[in-house]
Image: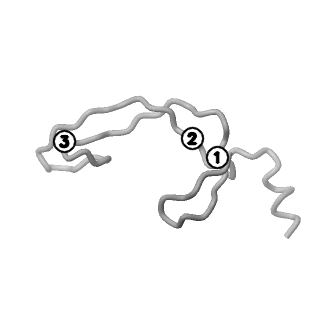
Amino acid sequence: MFVPSAKTGKSMILDATPRKGVIVRNERGTFGHVPGGGLTEEALVVDVYTDHHATCLQAEDWRAKK
């Protein structure tokens, strides 16, 4: 599936089937661990979509086409 990147707005391809992954959300509602920040954090299990370039079995074939 193609979705726009939140950083660049360009389309990126993701594997269509998500995997379960863990994220950490702090009391500010932002994600990630804040060492020594004294924030209450919670771990959430969520659907995580992987960049297709990381899992493509034909990645080498596509690189050779350039």
- Determine which of the numbered discs, if any, sits on residue 24 in the image: none
Residue at the image position 66 percent from the left and 50 percent from the top = 2
- Determine which of the numbered discs, if any, sits on residue 14 in the image: 1
Q: Nearer the viewer, residue 30 or 33?
A: 30
Q: Nearer the viewer, residue 29 or 54?
A: 29
Name the N-terminal-most of marks 1 and 3: 1
| Residue with the mark numbered 2 | 49
Q: Is residue 8 above or below residue 15?
A: below
Asked whether the residues under the numbered discs 1 and 2 touch, taking CB atoms below 8 Å apart as contact, a structural biologist would say yes
Alpha-carbon distance for marks 1 and 3? 29 Å
Q: Nearer the viewer, residue 42 or 4?
A: 4
Image-based side of 43 in relation to 9, left or right: left
Element type at marker 2?
A: loop
Image-based side of 57 in relation to 41, left or right: right
Image-based side of 41 in relation to 19, left or right: left
Element type at marker 3?
A: loop
Kind of residue sitting beneath label 1: Leu
Name the N-terminal-most of marks 2 and 3: 3
| Residue with the mark numbered 3 | 27
Residue at the image position 57 percent from the left and 57 percent from the top = 4
Alpha-carbon distance for marks 1 and 2? 6 Å
Kind of residue sitting beneath label 3: Glu
Residue 15 location, x and y as percent?
66, 41
Element type at marker 1?
A: loop
Alpha-carbon distance for marks 2 and 3? 24 Å
Residue 1 location, x and y as percent?
68, 45
Q: How many marks?
A: 3
